[in-house]
Amino acid sequence: MKSLLLVLALVLIPASSFAVTDQQVRDMIIKESLQSYPGNCPCPYNTMRNGRRCGGRSAYSRPGGRSPLCYPKDVTDKMVKAYREQHHVK
């Protein structure tokens, strides 16, 4: 019975009515940035096809070209605000 009520609540209450923290928004922005990267080494902590860490070979570590967002410190408060407005996130 509890699970049915939870499911109903999740279906009936729009996701935008839940409060989202700035850290959660930063995580969403980073996730979108990594998903839009065409290769498999956007960030130093990712792994190459052979299983080794990307490290200095990552796009993040190389100057010029693509600059994926890998860490929360890369996402500015201005970016968080713009994301909230664009995606209607409270």
Image (cartoon, rainbow, N blue to C red):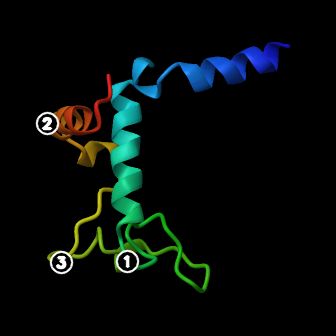
Residue 85: give x, y in percent of width and height.
20, 32
Q: Toward the viewer: 84 or 88? A: 88
Q: Amino acid at mark 1?
A: Pro
Q: Quadrant of the N terminus?
A: top right
Q: Is residue 19 visible?
A: no
Q: To which residue does mark 3 refer?
A: 65
Q: Amino acid at mark 2?
A: Lys
Q: CA distance from mark 3 to mark 1?
A: 12 Å
Q: To which residue does mark 1 refer?
A: 38
Q: If you read the primary sequence from the N terminus, does the residue marked by circle 3 or circle 1 appear first?
A: 1
Where disc 2 sits, the SS reads: helix
- Give me the residue at 35% from left, 35% from top: 25
Q: CA distance from mark 2 to mark 3?
A: 23 Å
Q: Toward the viewer: 76 or 14? A: 14
Above or below for 65 versus 34: below
Where disc 1 sits, the SS reads: loop
Q: Is residue 47 left or right of residue 83?
A: right
Q: Amino acid at mark 3?
A: Gly
Q: To which residue does mark 2 refer?
A: 78
Q: Quadrant of residue 80?
A: top left
Which residue is at the far right?
1
